């Protein structure tokens, strides 16, 4: 294998530490062409689609890309902002705020973001971090619950790219944080803040992204981790089993996926006489197509059309300070032992840079 040329090694250099926040990805624009490019990369990942490659190639290129791209582009257009894709906007701001919180806590680390599919890509950002002198990299997926279809695919992209490197940085990988206290507490605060303003619903629906049922039968822990997140949150909210339900959305294809499915469950609740539901998507740390269009628009229509009277979507954690603090805690716990602490003479400059990063992130949010 031909290995890539590396920068000349600087002797006696301790290198820098970086946190790489990796999200799923997004099209570059809400257009058919851009969405087709994105879907082609996404749906070509064998971690996502476990169908024989030759069979899937004909399905993907003969059916899905020619017909689904335009429909998906229309959906993206319905939630697109002047700053771009909501998923990318939130990911950028979360990375900026994370760097700020880590800086305030005395850590001198770089924080970058990448997309598993689309831009900036994992290989691109890894090379930028290495070129900047980062010799220790913590890979932090934007998925609280682990799945081979998502988290493992990020790890694949990291390992695949670094397989061609001569000077491989020290790596640490965050597998999951589905039961992290700070994450659960941030979810709790978000729900309670909503209830304090609007009162409590007849049922709280926790909708997670779905995966094929066969992944569970083959040993993927995703279903169990979703259930644990929901149970911990319900306990924090003081809910009994009759007051909430766990569902799975975004089913694709004809195979059986994890159940119960979100849309049919909402219709069933409406027909059973539940007048109001609040829907939360704990598996997404930032609002995106699956939450803003599939839940806040499509699922709302499903519930109201079936006879429900009131549907409330509780936004993702996004840039909630409680969540960014939790994200910083997760990063700190996985960086233990690395030389990340700022030397005393640099503390004031680091805090100033952290404050500037947070101000920029908040300013971006105010312009949405």
Image (tube, helix red, strand yellow):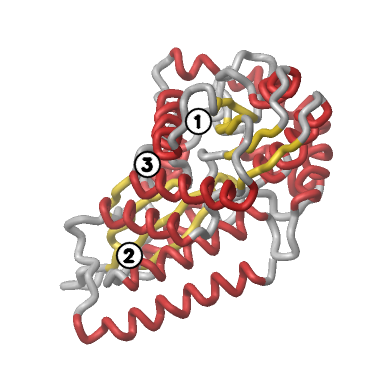
Marks 3 and 2, the one that precedes in the sequence: 2
Marks 1 and 2, the one that precedes in the sequence: 2
Residue 257 in the image: x percent, y percent?
59, 18
Badge 1 element: loop
Q: Which residue is mark 2?
A: 134
Badge 2 element: strand
Q: Nearer the viewer, residue 114 or 256?
A: 256
Q: Which residue is mark 1?
A: 149
Query: Quadrant location of residue 83?
Result: bottom right
Marks 3 and 1, the one that precedes in the sequence: 1
Residue 128 in the image: x percent, y percent?
44, 64
Quarter of the image with the C terminus in it: bottom right
Q: Which residue is mark 3?
A: 177
Left or right for 103, reference 284: left
Which mark lies nearer to you, 3 or 1?
A: 3
C-alpha gap between disc 3 and disc 1: 16 Å
Left or right for 210, reference 158: right
Left or right for 109, reference 308: left
Q: Residue at x 62, y 67 (%)?
A: 365
Q: Nearer the viewer, residue 326 or 122?
A: 326
């Amino acid at each position: 294998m031909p290995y890539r040329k590396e920068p000349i090694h600087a002797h006696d250099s301790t290198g820098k530490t970086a946190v790489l926040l990796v999200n799923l990805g997004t099209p570059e624009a809400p257009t058919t062409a851009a969405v087709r490019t994105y879907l082609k990369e996404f749906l070509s990942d064998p971690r996502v689609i476990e169908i024989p490659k030759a069979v899937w190639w004909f399905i993907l290129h003969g059916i899905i890309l020619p017909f689904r791209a335009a429909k998906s582009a229309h959906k993206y257009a319905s939630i697109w902002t002047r700053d771009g894709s909501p998923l990318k906007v939130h990911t950028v701001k979360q990375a900026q705020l994370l760097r700020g919180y880590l800086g305030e806590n005395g850590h001198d680390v770089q924080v970058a973001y990448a997309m598993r599919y689309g831009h900036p890509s994992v290989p691109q950002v890894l090379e930028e971090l290495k070129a900047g002198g980062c010799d220790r990299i913590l890979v932090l997926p934007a998925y609280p619950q682990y799945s081979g279809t998502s988290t493992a695919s990020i790890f694949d992209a990291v390992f695949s790219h670094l397989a061609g490197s001569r000077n491989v940085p020290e790596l640490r990988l965050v597998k999951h944080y589905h039961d992290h206290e700070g994450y659960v507490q941030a979810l709790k605060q978000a729900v309670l803040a909503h209830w304090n303003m609007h009162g409590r619903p007849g049922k709280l629906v926790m909708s997670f992204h779905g995966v094929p049922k066969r992944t569970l039968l083959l040993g993927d822990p995703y279903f169990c981790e979703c259930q644990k997140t929901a149970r911990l949150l319900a306990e924090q909210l003081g809910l009994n089993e009759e007051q909430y339900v766990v569902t799975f959305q975004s089913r694709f294809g004809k195979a059986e996926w994890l159940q119960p499915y979100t849309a049919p469950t909402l219709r069933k609740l409406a027909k059973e006489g539940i007048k109001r539901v609040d829907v939360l998507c704990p598996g997404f740390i930032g609002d995106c197509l699956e939450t803003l269009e599939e839940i806040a628009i499509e699922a709302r229509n499903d519930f109201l059309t079936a006879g429900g009277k009131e549907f409330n979507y509780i936004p993702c954690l996004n840039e909630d300070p409680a969540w960014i603090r939790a994200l910083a805690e997760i990063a700190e716990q996985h960086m233990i032992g690395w030389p990340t602490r700022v030397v005393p003479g640099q503390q004031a400059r680091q805090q100033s840079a952290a404050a500037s990063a947070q101000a920029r992130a908040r300013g971006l949010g105010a312009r949405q």
